[in-house]
């Protein structure tokens, strides 16, 4: 078969492999819970964010400046959570046993099949219990008004993260910021998964020393000789 045709078949096969992830569970019902349409996230979290804003004002946080301040604090809290959750929890990779199985279910499947549109946002079966833990923590530490405003900013940050993640995989951004975010995340997937953990907030990679090398630095670094290729 001519080489161009064989190459095109290879590309098509690879694209399908990146897109079509296998079932996590034998039960079709359980596996369905692990797959979620991206529209589910704003459908759930926009009302939740609105409710937290309402209760922030209702419980005594009447100052507009105070409301904005605590919402901003909540957003920053999310961006730090996004970075460290991705770096420490999602990329904790045991080699075998139940730990390896859990890692594949939590994040490994996404790296194996990063273009599966039904596994690009966190399913509510995971996001809602995890979010409830943070809500409980913030209400233990802060008065109700401040805690609710912080939660509104936290979940607004989460919503921005999940939607950004989906778009980076399934849209080609036209804006300069969008292109930079996409390049940053694609480097994590296809170049080096020990860098570029920030998705909606890539500046934390610069702060914590996990930013990928710039193109200029990569171009000036010595290139190792590629290994010989064999045909099967």
Image (cartoon, rainbow, N blue to C red):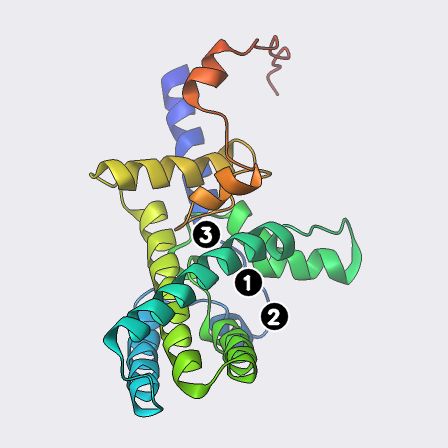
Query: Is the residue 8 above or below the residue 181 in the image?
Result: above
**Residue lying furthest right:** 97
Q: Residue at x 42, y 57 (%)?
A: 120
| C-beta proximity under 8 Å, tags 2 and 1 | yes
Q: Which mark is residue 170?
A: none
Name the disc covering residue 20, or none.
Answer: 3
What residue is pinned by disc 2?
Answer: 26
Gap in Å between the C-alphas at discs 1 and 3?
A: 10 Å
Instruction: Give the residue drawn at x 41%, y 65%.
Output: 73
Query: Vertically, is 60 above or below 45?
Result: below
Whether residue 42 is visible: yes
Q: Is residue 216 left or right of residue 178?
A: right
Secondary structure beneath dot 3 equals: loop
User: In the shown orientation, is residue 145 left or right of residue 85?
Assistant: left
Q: Residue at x 51, y 78 (%)?
A: 138
What x and y, as percent, mark residue 230? Answer: 62, 14
Residue at position x 58%, y 64% in the image: 24
The quadrant of the rendering that contains the C terminus is top right
Q: CA distance from mark 3 to mark 2?
A: 16 Å
Instruction: Please determine whether, in this image, residue 165 is positioned above or below residue 138.
Output: above
- Give the residue number, with chain letter if any, for mark 1: 23
Q: Where's the N terminus, which quadrant?
A: top left
CA distance separating discs 2 and 1 = 7 Å
- Residue 68 in the image: x percent, y percent? 29, 69
Mark 3 in CB contact with mark 2 (< 8 angstroms): no
Residue 43 image point, x, y percent: 29, 75
Q: Say whether disc 3 or disc 2 marks the residue closer to the N-terminus.
A: 3
């Amino acid at each position: 078969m001519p080489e161009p045709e064989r190459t095109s078949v290879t590309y098509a096969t690879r694209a399908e492999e990146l897109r079509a992830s296998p079932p996590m569970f034998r039960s079709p019902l359980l596996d369905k819970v692990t797959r979620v349409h991206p529209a589910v996230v704003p459908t759930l979290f926009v009302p939740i964010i609105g409710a937290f804003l309402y209760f922030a004002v209702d419980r005594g946080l009447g100052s507009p400046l105070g409301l904005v301040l605590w919402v901003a604090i909540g957003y920053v809290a999310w961006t730090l959570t996004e970075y460290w959750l991705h770096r420490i929890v999602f990329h904790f990779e045991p080699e075998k046993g139940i730990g390896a199985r859990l890692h594949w279910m939590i994040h490994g499947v996404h790296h194996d099949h990063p273009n599966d549109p039904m596994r690009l946002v966190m399913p509510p079966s995971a996001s809602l219990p995890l979010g409830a833990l943070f809500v409980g923590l913030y209400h233990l530490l802060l008065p109700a008004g401040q805690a609710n405003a912080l939660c509104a900013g936290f979940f607004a940050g989460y919503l921005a993260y999940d939607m950004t993640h989906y778009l980076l995989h399934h849209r080609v951004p036209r804006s300069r910021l969008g292109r930079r975010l996409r390049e940053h995340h694609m480097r994590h997937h296809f170049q080096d998964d020990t860098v570029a953990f920030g998705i909606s907030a890539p500046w934390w990679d610069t702060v914590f020393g996990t930013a990928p090398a710039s193109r200029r630095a990569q171009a000036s670094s010595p290139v190792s000789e590629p290994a010989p290729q064999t045909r099967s």
